[in-house]
Image: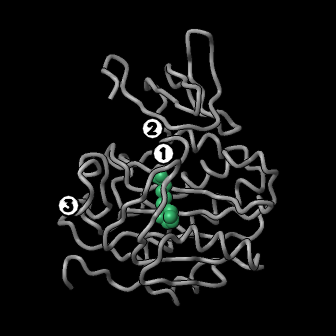
Amino acid sequence: MAPDETEPLDLARTMQETWIDRVHFFKEIESTNTTALRQVRENDPAGVELFVADRQTGGRGRGSNAWWSGPGSLTFSLLTAPLDLPTDQLPRVSLTVGLALCLAVERFAEPAGVALKWPNDVYLAERKVGGILIELASGLAHRPVIGVGLNVNNLLTGAPKELRSTAICLRETCTGSPLLDRTEVLIECLTQIERQLARLQSGDRSLPDDWRTYSLLTGQQVRVQRPGHSTSGLCESIADDGSLLVRTPQGIESCYGGEVSAWFPGERER
Ligand code: BTN
């Protein structure tokens, strides 16, 4: 197989081994999240649906960021069954999906290097391996679209320059750099998302401890930027409600969203 080719996903197996009721596969599409959002708005289907693409021409990240993905990556959006949760639980949904991806990535990588960067970036060896974009169609907050981009076999050599030193793919951490089976990675991600969301919905009180165990930012100096407001200080922890706790000269501030930059105490801001 040529280095820029993508081995086909086994979607029949994915359906057999996971909670997915229906798969929509696209060789190329603008964004699986955009398509999944349209599906909720127009049809609000009863079951769990997966939208997966080999290539996105307009992949979106959080905020105004784009999502780059080369051949061999995984890009998918999941439309879950209606979630039995109040709408103010979205920060907890976000962290829980992040935790699920950490647990999935851990199966294919060196576990010690896997971390969750609040609110839901997945890191491996201090570089970003995966990102999550959760979006709601208006009036349908109980059916979030969970978009996942994971660098699996896509080497970063073809990535935009700024990503080459900050991102990583799973394949880079495997001895001998073999190609990973993307179907297995996809199945593991879907299984973990189902499992961890079930814990959230059943009110499992140990779940926040698991977010905290994987937290990359705890103990680091952080700057959390939101429109018109920025908080700087030492990241103390992640609270049970999903907020990031930052110690500032005025006391502990709970941050519910924003762009985070981080650096270790004593280092200069990166
Ligand atoms: C981020 O880290 O900023 C979030 C990235 C999310 C990317 C995924 S790829 C599949 C889905 N479709 C999109 O357009 N975005 C998400």
Q: Quadrant of residue 178?
A: bottom left
Nearest to the observer: residue 97 or residue 108: 97
Q: Amino acid at mark 2?
A: Leu
Give SS at disc 3: helix
> Mark 3 is on which residue type?
Thr
Badge 3 is on which residue? Answer: 157
Q: Is residue 246 left or right of residue 125?
A: right
Residues marked 2 and 1 touching at CB (< 8 Å):
yes
Residue 195 as seen in the image, left or right of residue 159: right
Indicate the position of residue 72 as horizontal and vertical percent values. 32, 73
Whole-number angstrom distance, CA of label 2 to CA of label 1: 6 Å
Answer with mark 3 or mark 2, whichever residue precedes in sequence.
3
Which residue position holds label 1?
A: 116
**1 above or below 225?**
below
Q: Tell me which numbered mark, 2 or 1, is placed earlier along the sequence.
A: 1
Quadrant housing the C terminus: top left
Q: Is residue 16 above or below residue 255?
A: below
In the rendered image, the residue lying farthest to the top is 249
Spatial separation of the CA atoms under disc 3 and disc 2: 26 Å
Residue name at image x 60 percent, y 48 percent: 95
Left-right relation of 24 to 92? left
Numbered disc in front, either 1 or 3? 3
Q: Which residue is labeled 2 in the image? A: 216
The picture quadrant where one finds residue 134 is bottom right
Seen in the picture, residue 135 relative to 4 is either above or below; the reply is above
Residue 216, position as x, y percentages in the image: 45, 38
Q: Residue at x 39, y 75 (%)?
A: 55
